[in-house]
Image (cartoon, helix red, strand yellow):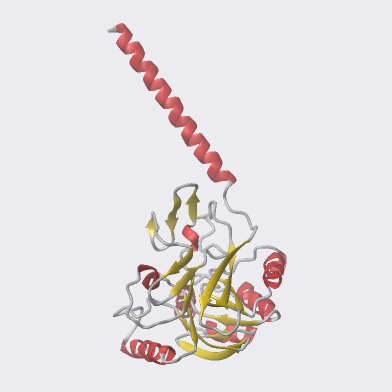
């Protein structure tokens, strides 16, 4: 009996020490991998029926941040990519704070590089509802071409391209609409945007529809999204363990996804919605998309 008790206590002690070591190692890892402000570049190559190659830089979920003094590092990195266009895929601000100066400054800085297209995110919509002002007017005055349930036809290096912007859940019945008039506006945008032989790029901040492949057969060539912050917390060999709006164990939070009707690229973004929820093992990123002839 005495030997049994001794063995049991020894096993409990070893188990306790092992658990403490695991907790300690995990805590050290998390603390040392809380993401700093070093920005990475995610590169994707998309083959398409286009006559010549062109380059897009996408930035999402800026959340009115400033990653370095006057965003010097971010602007320098974008310049080095030599983009033909820059896409800002929503949530440039925080919807619960009135301050917009950093987001406006970012647009002005990027507009000196090339044309900037902005698609609104849920934080833009929340901001307008809270402060009863037009965020799109501020973005436009800063130098961006804002696409909110709207599109524009452009020529990029000899390629006929249609760029559209939409915030919510694309082509899902009910969608993110506040009333019947808003729903009609969205449906009219869909029908007009899709009705072209041009190469179609949709800035769609919330990527759920595309990632789940749960949309109708309306071919859109390339979708640029964000919203999920790359999973916010990312662990080695496990991947994303938490993401805003999804919760624990989120699927499809960053990267490129090829569907039957569209290719979707989800950026993990550069900013943080809540300062008290850090990004862990998940550096801020800009996305570079090279669209090349098949």
User: Which x, y percent locates residue 196?
Assistant: 45, 92
Q: Quadrant of residue 11?
A: top left
User: Which x, y percent locates residue 68?
Assistant: 69, 63
- Judge by depth and name the residue closer to the eye, 217 or 238: 217
What residue is at 70 percent from the left and 79 percent from the top? 113
- Judge by depth and name the residue closer to the eye, 124 or 184: 184
Query: What is the residue that sits farthest to the top in this orientation?
Result: 2
User: Which x, y percent locates residue 98?
Assistant: 55, 74
Query: What is the residue that sits farthest to the front in this orientation?
Result: 294
User: Which x, y percent locates residue 80?
Assistant: 71, 70
Q: Quadrant of the N terminus?
A: top left
- Compared with 192, 169 (above or below) is above
What residue is at 47 percent from the left and 47 percent from the top? 237
What residue is at 45 percent from the left and 28 percent from the top? 18
Q: How many marks?
A: 0
- Compared with 272, 83 (above or below) is below
What residue is at 53 percent from the left and 91 percent from the top? 153
- Compared with 179, 23 (above or below) is above
- Judge by depth and name the residue closer to the eye, 44 or 108: 44
- Judge by depth and name the residue closer to the eye, 234 or 294: 294
């Amino acid at each position: 009996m005495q030997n049994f008790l001794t063995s049991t206590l020894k096993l409990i002690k070893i188990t306790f020490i092992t658990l403490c070591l695991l907790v300690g190692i995990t805590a050290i890892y998390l603390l040392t991998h809380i993401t700093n402000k070093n920005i990475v570049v995610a590169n994707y190559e998309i083959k398409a029926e286009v006559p010549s190659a062109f380059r897009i830089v996408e930035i999402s979920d800026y959340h009115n941040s400033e990653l370095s003094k006057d965003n010097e590092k971010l602007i320098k990195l974008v310049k080095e990519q030599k983009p033909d266009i820059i896409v800002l895929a929503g949530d440039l601000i925080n919807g619960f704070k009135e301050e917009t100066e950093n987001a406006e400054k970012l647009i002005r800085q990027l507009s000196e590089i090339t044309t900037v297209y902005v698609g609104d995110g849920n934080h833009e919509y929340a901001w307008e509802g809270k402060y009863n002002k037009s965020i799109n007017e501020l973005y436009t005055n800063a130098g961006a071409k804002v696409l909110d349930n709207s599109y524009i036809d452009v020529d990029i290096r000899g390629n006929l391209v249609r760029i559209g912007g939409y915030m919510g859940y694309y082509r899902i019945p009910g969608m993110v609409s506040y009333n019947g008039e808003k729903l009609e506006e969205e449906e009219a945008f869909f029908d007009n945007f899709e009705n072209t032989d041009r190469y179609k790029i949709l800035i769609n901040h919330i990527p759920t529809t595309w990632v789940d492949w749960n949309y109708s057969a309306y071919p859109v060539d390339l979708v640029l999204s964000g919203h999920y912050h790359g999973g916010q917390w990312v662990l080695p060999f496990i991947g994303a363990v938490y993401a805003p709006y999804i919760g624990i164990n989120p699927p499809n939070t960053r990267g490129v996804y090829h569907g039957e009707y569209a290719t979707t690229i989800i950026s993990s973004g550069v900013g943080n919605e809540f300062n008290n929820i850090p990004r862990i093992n998940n550096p801020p990123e800009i996305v570079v998309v090279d669209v090349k002839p098949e």
